[in-house]
Amino acid sequence: MNDELEMLAALLAAVVTSLPPLRWGGDAEGGAPFVEADPNDPSKVRGFDVEVAEEMAKGLGRRAEFVQVAFNSIDQSVQRGDFDIGMSGVEETPARRAALATTVPYYEFHEVLTVRSEDRGRFRTLADLRGRRVGTLGATIAYERLRSEPVNLISYEDDVHPYSDLREGRLDAVLLDNVIAARSTRRVGGLYTQSQPVATGHYIIVLARDNAKLRDRINEILKARMRDGTLERIYRNWGIWDGYQPSFFSSVLAAHTEIADRGPRTADREVLAYLPALLRASVVTIILSCASMALAILVGTGIATGRVYGNVIVRSILTTYVEVIRGTPVLLQLFVLYYGLSAVIRLPAFLAALLGLGLNYAAYESEIYRGSLEAVPRGQLEAARTLGLTEAQVLRLVRGPQAFRLALPPMTNDFVALLKDSSLVSVITVVELTKQTSIFAANIGSWVVPGALCAALYLLLSLPLSRLAMRLERRWKAATS
C-alpha cells in the first residue's frame, strides 16, 4: 500500500513538473504584508499575496512563479501576456472590471485616515481636513475619493513616503488601505489611525480579458479556500485578519452569479472629466520646465565662465561639480534634495523639483557654453585685447555673442529634453503631465486615449519652442553675416 502511495505521489509530482508554471505578477517594492523579498533569501518573496498565489497554483496542479512588475503596470502587463495573473493589493474598480477578466474579491480592506498623534482630535474625518494637504497613492480608490473632496490632494508613487512626510509635517493626513496604514504606523512613530473607515474596497486578481476560462477556475479555488479556512489561516499569519472578513467571505460565497464581462468602454466621460486635470498638469510642466531652464542657464553660464577664466582651484571645484552631477542619476538627486535634506531643510516639492532639474541641467549647459566660448577664434580675442578692451569687455562684446550663437541649437535641444525629463519629478509628489496621464490611464483601464492626449500636449508645448529657436537662429545669422 505504501509503495502504491509513493508511486502515485511520484506520478502527481511528475505531472505538476510537466505543466507550465502559473506566472503571477506583483510588486515586491510594495513590501510586507503583500509581497516582499525574503530577508533569509532575497531571491525569494514572501507575503500573504505570495501564499494566496501559491494556493491558486496548487489548486491548478501547477507551481507558482513570481514576476516582478511595477504596481502601476500590472493591468497593462497582464493584458499583454507578461504573466497569467496579477495580484499585489490590486483594488477592485469599475475600470478593471470593464477592461480585464477579474476574479471574485479575496480580501476586504478599508480606507482609513492616518494623522499625527497630536492631531487625532482635530482631524477625525475628511470634513475636518478642508483645505489641508492629504496624501495617497495615485490611481487608487483613495485617490478618486479625495478628488471629490475639498482638500489639497498630494499624489505619491509609493506607500512609504506619505507616512514619513506626514510625520515631518509636509502632510496633514494620509488616506490609504488599513493594511498599509497598520504597517506604516508600526514603522513610523507618532502617528494615529482613525478607527472610522472612510470607504470600503476589495483586493482582486486580474487576468487578460480573453482569459476568462482560467479566471473561472481561480474563482472556484478562491471560494474553496474561503470555505476550508486556508485564506483565514494565511491572513491570521500575516496579521491582517479582522472582524470584517467573516461577513465578507459569506457574501462572496453566497453570490452564485458569475461576473459578466463587459465590452470596452468608450471613455468619453472619463476624457471630459480628466481633461481639465491634464491641462492643469500641462501648466505645471511648462512653468517648471521654464523656471528650471532659466536656473540651468544662469548657473551653467557661471560654471562655464569660471572654468574658462578661473584659477586652478576654481576650475577644479567646478569640474568636480560637473562630473558628480553628470555621473549620478537625476532621480537620486531629486530624492536627496527632497527627502535626504529634510532633516536640515524641508524644501517644498515644487522648489525641490525646480532645483533638482535646474542644477542637473546646469552641468550639461556649462559644457555647451564652455565649448562655445573656446570655439571663438583666438585671433579675434587677441585683436580685441590689442585694441585695449578688458577681459570683461572681450567676453561681453566679442566672445559672448559669438558663443551664444553657437550654443543656441544645443540649448534648444536641452530645453526640449528638460520638458520631457520633468516627468521624473512625480517621485517627489509633483503632479505634472505624465503623472496625471498615468493616473488617468489607470482609472479608465487603457493607455490609448490618455497616451494620445499626453503626446499631443507635449507637442503643443515643445513645437513653439523649437520654432522660436529657429527664428532666433535665423535672425542671429542675418545680424552677424
Image (cartoon, grey):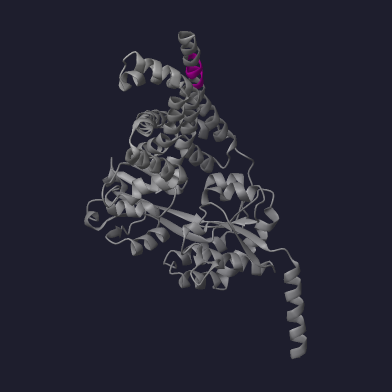
208 left or right of 450 in image: right
Residue 474 among magenta residues: no
Position of 233 relative to 417 (above/below):
below
Q: Main secondary structure of the magenta part?
A: helix
> Does residue 207 show up?
yes
In front of the other: 349 or 343:
343
Give the total of numbered labels: 0
The residue that appears at 23% across and 54% down in the rendered structure is: 119
Residue 325, by quadrant, is top left
Image coordinates of residue 32 in percent, x first then y, are 46, 64
In the orientation shown, which residue stands out farthest toward the front? 386
In front of the other: 8 or 422:
422
> Does residue 277 show up?
no
Position of 298 relative to 205 (above/below):
above
423 left or right of 54 in image: left
In front of the other: 227 or 70:
70
In the orientation shown, which residue stands out farthest toward the bottom? 1
Image coordinates of residue 12 in percent, x first then y, are 74, 76
Magenta highlight range? 466-471
Q: In which quadrant of the rendered image does the N terminus lie?
A: bottom right
Image coordinates of residue 312 in percent, x first then y, are 35, 39
The residue that appears at 37% across and 15% down in the rendered structure is: 384
269 left or right of 152 in image: right
Image coordinates of residue 30 in percent, x first then y, are 47, 57
Residue 22, by quadrant, is bottom right
Position of 139 relative to 458 (above/below):
below
Position of 85 relative to 93 (above/below):
below
Residue 468 among magenta residues: yes
